Amino acid sequence: MIIGLEHYLFVAVLLFSIGFFGVLLRKNTLVVFMCLELMLSASILALIAFSRFNSTPSHPLMEGNLLVLFIIAIAACEVAVGLAIIVALWRRNQTVELDEITELKH
Amino acid sequence: MKEILFHFFAALTLVPAFFVATSRKPVNAAMNMMLSFVGLSAMFVLLETYFLAVLQVLVYAGAIVVLFLFIVMLIDAGKSPQPNIIRFLASLAAFALLVFGGYTLVFSGGAGPFAEISTESPANMAQNFGTLLFTRYLLPFQITGFMLLIAMIGVIVVSKGPEEENEGGAE
């Protein structure tokens, strides 16, 4: 059996769905954020797999790989800002559980 | 050989990812996330994208996981409550069903249209990235640099807290 594009995409889909349901179902803000990172890395895997399997010698597809490079840089920014927001939330409410943050509800 | 490696690293990516989504303590989730990212970078190596594999380990498994662990230590996030065992088993069963159903569906179909890799990988050398990054994609590269600067300033402003921020506004 030869490992093809669909096998990598299968792994990416599973990783994305784990992250997606983690974001939907978990109540701890930190774990939700980690699941968000899992979704991002699943999309990275799909991009690299597509870029690898669709390139030909006359037309090398570097665009997918470069997009991954930018995604990694932006993800680093996003993690820094998001964690700063979580720390600010903790200072304000002394909790990071999403069930207990109900300021906009009342 | 490559098939065995693919299956091993796919398991190394997916099993810790499942534990990230289900573990009760954020510290365990962060450690599992590191394992998952190492497995993912091994899959990049299988795709012959060595530079991005190195970058994945450096940025994700290195910096981002350490940042998560630092914040977990800082804010003292406690355990999540014990999950309902029936719900946990149900989610595990659904995940297993998804994995094995998709596995049989994907792996029994024979070779797809993209199954054969005959060409050399376009991104097997860091030189390819550098050439394109400093010629055709110079503007996005510079914008990304500014984005990092903006994020740094934003983090400083957010983490200073409300009282210092008021003083800063009055100055």
Image (cartoon, coloured by chain):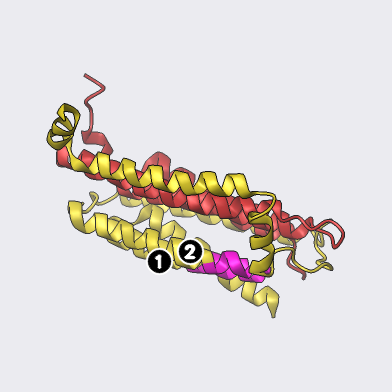
Chain colours: A red, B yellow
Residue range (magenta) = B38-54
Examine the rendering and report whether any part of residue B90 can be seen: no
State how far apart marks 2 and 1 are (Cα).
10 Å
Query: Which-is-in-front pick, marks 2 and 1?
Result: 1
Image location of residue B156, percent across then percent down: 27, 45
Q: Residue at x 77, y 69 (%)?
A: A2
Examine the rendering and report whether any part of residue B65 can be seen: yes
Q: Residue farthest to the bottom?
A: B1
Q: Earlier in the sequence, mark 2 or mark 1?
A: 2
**Protein chain holding label 2:** B
Q: Residue farthest to the front?
A: B171
Magenta segment: does it hold B47? yes
What predominant SS class does the magenta segment belong to? helix
**Protein chain holding label 1:** B
Q: Which residue is mark 2?
A: B37
Tell me: residue B39, above or below residue A48.
below
